[in-house]
Image (cartoon, helix red, strand yellow):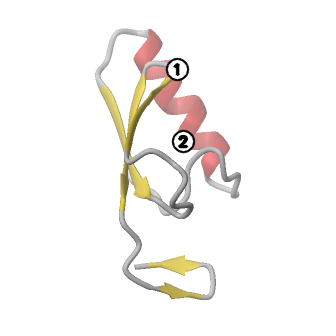
Amino acid sequence: MGLDYYRPNVSGLTPYVEHLAEGLARRGHAVYVLTHRHDPALPRVAEENGVRVVRAAVAARVGKALV
């Protein structure tokens, strides 16, 4: 799954993707979320509730949009 923002940031799409990803992981699926590392303090790769979260570097910001 891919989206601009993921936990700990909460946007309109984040709770839906989180619920779906964690539900699939509980059912035994290997689930990855690819997102931006909007906060440099966040780890680049993490395991959160059975979901592997991979955060890509942010090259630029245009308003709230991340590149």
Image mark for residue 49: 1
| Viewer-proximal residue among 55 and 29 | 55
Indicate whether 28 appears above or below 67.
above
Q: Residue at x 43, y 85 (%)?
A: 60
Residue beneath disc 2: 17
Q: Amino acid at mark 1?
A: Asn
| Viewer-proximal residue among 20 and 7 | 7
Helix, strand or loop status at disc 1? loop
Q: Residue at x 36, y 66 (%)?
A: 57
Q: Residue at x 70, y 57 (%)?
A: 12
Image quarter of residue 36: bottom left
Indicate whether 33 appears above or below 11.
above
Q: Is residue 12 left or right of residue 67?
A: right
Image quarter of residue 59: bottom left
Q: Which is in the foreground here, disc 2 or disc 1? A: 1
Q: Is residue 21 left or right of residue 44?
A: right
